Image (cartoon, rainbow, N blue to C red):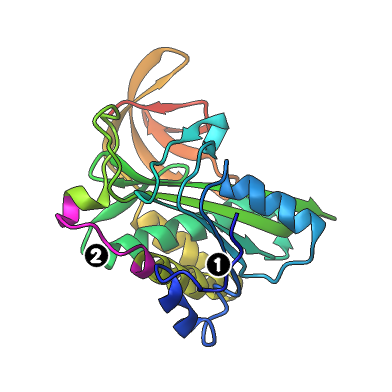
Amino acid sequence: MVLLWGKNTEFYPLICFMNRLFIPQKIIELSSIDSTNSYLVNLSQNIELDEGTIVIAYEQTKGKGQRKNSWSSEPSKSLCISLLLRPRINVSQQFLFNKFISLSLCQALAEYNIPAVIKWPNDILIETKKIAGILIENSIRSNEIEKSIVGIGVNISNNISHLPHATTLKNHLKITPSLNELIKIICVRIEVNYELLKKNPSLVNKLYHNNLFKIGELQKFSVNGEFFDGIINSVNEKGQLVVEVNNGLNYYIMGEIKFII
């Protein structure tokens, strides 16, 4: 483990914008770790960390995804970061918080002229292939989200030959993008939308839906092995996917419904 504030040249340029941005407040750089989220969760339980602290790892050996899925990453070929936020918003806005993070990552990739979209609940796709994933772990007290650990993984130049539904930035840019630059862009987008979340949550919700995969389109799904066609209507405040089926609206929770792509 290495604890640095920009000593390594790969991340040094981040220091130039630390004074003008709330995120990142501090950077903890790790050569290898099982999971940046697990590391930051444990660290934040033992010492007082500033909001905006980021953990960056060159290699993640047991990266976590949604529903106990894994996030595989090769050394220096993926962006693996976790961010500490203290939103102090009502627990009823828990999925809106999820929406703001997904939106921020989608917008960050758009700065590379990549038309990324958000696949419910929070996978980021290019066309129909996964480029990035998000895992948010919240600590709740007195009906308020007191602390959030936001894990973000982006495929940069991984070998994904064994993952037919994944893609990398290198595949679309034809070059390997700078990790420094990508982190910087993601931090800026998260900071802008974090303020928007608190000041104009309805706009966050609108922008999320503007970038939602297959919204308003006929899509094939399966539930409990049964296949059917439906039209994605929205994602509601509870985080349920609202699908129009046979002129009625059905509501699905995470893990209950599968996209057939």
Question: Identity of the amino acid at label 2?
Answer: Tyr
Instruction: Tell me the amino acid under the disc marked 1.
Output: Pro
Which numbered disc, 2 or 1, marks the residue that appears first in the sequence? Answer: 2
The circle drawn on residue 161 is: none
In percent of the image, x 41 and y 59: which residue is there?
Answer: 105
Relative horizontal placement of residue 191, taking residue 138 as reference (left or right): left
Dot 2 crowding, Cα within 10 Å, few <14, some 14–19, many 20+: some
Within 10 Å of disc 1 (Cα), the crowding (few <14, some 14-19, many 20+) is: some
Instruction: Please give left or right for residue 214 compared with residue 149 in the image.
Output: left
Q: Residue 122 at x, y = what percent?
A: 46, 46
2 or 1: mark nearer the eye: 2
Provide the residue designation for mark 2.
112
Residue 133: image quadrant is top left
Magenta stretch: give its range.
172-181
Instruction: Identify the image quadrant of the N terminus.
Output: bottom right
The question of residue 178 being in magenta is answered with: yes
**Most foreground residue, 20 or 15:** 15
Give the residue number, with chain letter if any, for mark 1. 201
Above or below residue 90? Residue 154 is: above
